[in-house]
Structure formats: structure tokens, C-alpha cells
Image (cartoon, rainbow, N blue to C red):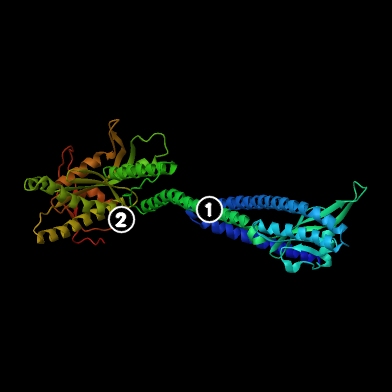
Amino acid sequence: MVFWIRRGLQVLGERGRLMRRRVVLWYGALPIRMKLILSTGILVVGLMTILSLLLLQQGNKLLRDRLGETCSLSLRHVSQAIKNDLLPYYLAVDDINNGSLYAGHIRETIHDVLNEEIDGLVYACVIDRYGLIIAHTDRHMINHKISVSDSLFFAVAQQTVARETGDIIEYIHPLFARREGSQSERVFLGVTVLGFSKKIIFNPIHRATQAIITLSSIVILFSVALIFFFARRMTGQIDALSEGVRRVSRGNLNVQIQVLTHDELGQLAREFNSMIVHLREKLQMQKFVSKLTVQMIKKRSTARDLLPVGERRGVTLLFSDVRNFSSLTEQLTPEEIIELINIYLDIQSRVIEENNGVVDKYMGDQIMAIFQGENMADNAVHAAVQIQRSIRELNKRRRRNGEVVLTVGCGLHIGSVVMGNMGSKNRMDYTVIGDIVNLASRLCAVAKPGQIIAPIEMVDKLDGEYPTIRLNPIRVKGRRQIVEIFEVDYDRAIIM
């Protein structure tokens, strides 16, 4: 038996824990707005309910006490008037004429009570010590005997008492007389009874109860509406911030959060808007800074010194330059020149990035790109071939539309350079310098429209086999020795 009791308590405990866990999980999944409304609403409803119950309890007690005092006073007043006739009535009980006289006085007093039109009074009566009704506001009840239980109840009453019978509440006042020659012994004469309608005499209590309930309901509804308003206003700012964060996480920086409040949440919204402005500015500024510089800054963001000294690196360089661009600029407006050159620079930049290269800088109509890593030479050749093929296809479409076309020449070189920050204290550029940079730039200048030129020593650095054409050696400015070069035949090159 003890085992089963323990087992039952254990099961109930586990179910209780499971239920609490479910409630906690359900509450935790609610939106903040619903949490505020539920928490504050339950608190307000609980407080108002407790306050209403206390007011009702105290009000009912106070009204009942006042009602009892009023009825008791009326009852004592009537009983005092009746007592003066009730004692002679007993003394003259054998005298029919005198007994009837005193009984008549008692009945008149009772009827006078009814004529006073006391609120809620249904009847009044006088019952003698033998249980006989000697006076009643309902004349048909006179000379009727009450029940034995009522007689015993009246006989033991020592002071005014109240009892409820159905829809009637009776106030009963016992009548006593002093026995001759004794100051302490009392003789029970009978009782005076006033019967009131509970519906009528408790009507003030009911009205007060309804008033308190109505007022409490109005306060609760008003409080819930006020809580909903403030919760919506507070969480509205949070919802706006949450939506803004979601849009930013999807890459949309054209976000402007509406500031709804002037508190901490409003300040947070303003700071969020300021952050988005700074992010947009940063994004725009990154477009004017080479990816090589951005990568260096990110790599060294935790270091105290963001300005690394120059370091030697092995790279492959690609220079691409538009041919005969200066002569074309005389035929176009500045706006048309910018639009035209941006079309060709955009194509080349995308091809370079697709082949793991980085655009180091734009120099007017020329591009300088850097390739690093294990396959940097092949990546650079791939990029140069795709640039020439893409521009050729673009020019075909533009010629059909009667638009101006441009052509480019590319120069490549591979070797060791010095990479680091160069410039003044207030304006720097993270780039590369070295002999191969100068030579790659010179080769680009030599290249004809649609041509890709590189030094002959770069052939040994390529992993793939590319159709090449050996060109005549050239002399370049700044070098005494001639430079052996070759051209990549991208029409025969199988590069996907």
C-alpha cells in the first residue's frame, strides 16, 4: 500500500514537472508583446480581483452590521412597547375582559409597526412563552401555535438573534420580566419577531457588489487596453529593429528604421540607423579600395600595427590597357566616356576575380591585376584569354547596334615583388613594386589590340599547354638587354 502511494506521488510529481516544462517552453516561444500583455495583464487582473474581494467582503460585513443594528433598534423599540402590555396580559390571563384588552393593545402596536412602512418588513408578531401567536400583522396567524423546535429556540434566546428561513430573515428579541423580590432572576415572557425580505434588505449590498464588480471590470479592461497600447508601442520598435536586422542580413543596406519612441529603444533605433549609414559608406569606400588592401586590413585587424613593412612575394601580374582611347575621347562627351570605359573595365574586373585574381588599381583606362597562389600563372593566362574573348563578343554586339567599340592589349609577367603600404602618412596604398611590375606594364604598352604578351621565361611556370607564338625580341625602356617575348594564341587555346 505504501509502495503504491509513493508510486502515485512520484507519477504526479513527474506529470507536474512535465506540465511546468511545457508551460515554460510555450511561454518562452511567445512574442515579447504577448509576454508583456500576459504578464502585466495577469498581474493587474489578480490585484484587482483580490482588491474587489476584499472590498466586497468588508462592504458586505459593514452593511450587514449596519442592517443588524437598525433592525435590532427597531425590534427593541417595539419590544419595549409590547412588554408593558405583555406582563399585565399574563397577570390577567384568567380575566377574559382584561386579557383581551391587553392582547388588543399588543396587536395594535404590531399593526402600528407595519404602518411605519419599514423597508423590507414583511411581518411582525408576538409569541408568548407557550408558543402561541398572540399578535401578528397577518390576522389569520393569531392564536396559532408555532412548532416545538421554534419554541425551544425562542426559549433559550438571551438576546436579540437573527436567523434566515428561506427568503426571510427574522430578528428575534426575547422579553423578560423581573421576578418579584429578586433582582437577578428573570421570567421569560415571550418574543417579538420582525420578518424581513432578504431580497429587499440586502438590495443595497447587491447594488454595492454590482458597482464594485462593474468598476473592477472597467478598470481591468482599461488596464488591459493601456497595457496593450504600451506593449505594442514598445514591441513595435523592437519589431522594426528585428525586421531591419533581417533585411541587413540578406544584404539590403537600404534600410531606415522609424524611431517610434524617445527612450532606450528609440536610442537603439537611432544608433541602428547610424550604423547602417556607416555600413553603406564603408561599402561605397571599399569600391574605391583594392581588394588586396581590404584583405590586408582584415588579416591584420587584431594587430596593433596595421601598417606592415614591405615583404617579398611571388606573384603574377596582368596589365590590360585600352588602345586608341585618347582619340575616341575627342568624339564623346565626358558622361559618354565614363559610361563607355566602365563597361569594358567591368567585364575585365569580373573575369579577373573569377580566376582568383585581384584588381590592384585602375589607372585611367588601364587595369593592374595581381594573382597569387599555386596556380597563379595559369590563372593569369586564363584571365587574359577570357578578357580578349569577352571583349571580342561584346564588340560584335556593339557594332551591330552601331555603338563605339574598344580594344585592349594585355601584358603578363611572373616573379618576385615587394608588397606593402606605400605613400604618405595620411594617404597610403597597399600594392606591389619591382622590376617585373615595370616590365609587365611595358609589355602591355607594346601589345597590339587583342594581343596577349608575356616574357619567354613565363612559359616554364605554366602547368598547362597553351598555343603560343614566339615574337621578335624587343627592347623596353629602362632595360639594356632585349626581352624575349611570346604571344598567347587564344583563338587556338582550349580554355573553358
For residue 212, say whether it is visible. Answer: yes
User: Which residue type does callout 1 highlight?
Assistant: Ile
Q: Earlier in the sequence, mark 1 or mark 2?
A: 1
**Foreground pick, 427 / 324:** 427
**Foreground pick, 420 / 346:** 346
Q: Is residue 328 left or right of residue 86?
A: left
Residue sitting farthest toward the top: 425
Quadrant of the rendered image containing residue 116:
bottom right
Q: Is residue 431 left or right of residue 208?
A: left
Q: Identify the residue at image location x=61%, y=55%.
A: 204
Quadrant that contains the N terminus: bottom right
Q: Which residue is mark 2?
A: 463
Crowd band around label 2 with a 10 angstrom C-alpha radius: few (<14), some (14–19), many (20+): few
User: Which residue type does callout 2 highlight?
Assistant: Asp
Q: Identify the residue at image location x=36%, y=43%.
A: 275
Q: Tell me residue 284's x, y (percent).
A: 28, 44
| Alpha carbons under labels 1 and 2: distance apart | 82 Å
* SS at circle 1: helix
**Foreground pick, 31 / 377:** 31
Q: Is residue 382 left or right of residue 299?
A: left
Crowd band around label 1 with a 10 angstrom C-alpha radius: few (<14), some (14–19), many (20+): many
Q: Is residue 1 left or right of residue 305?
A: right
* SS at circle 2: loop
For residue 314, say whether it is visible. Answer: no
- Depicted 424 relative to depicted 31: above or below: above
Q: Which residue is mark 1?
A: 220
Residue sitting farthest toward the right: 181
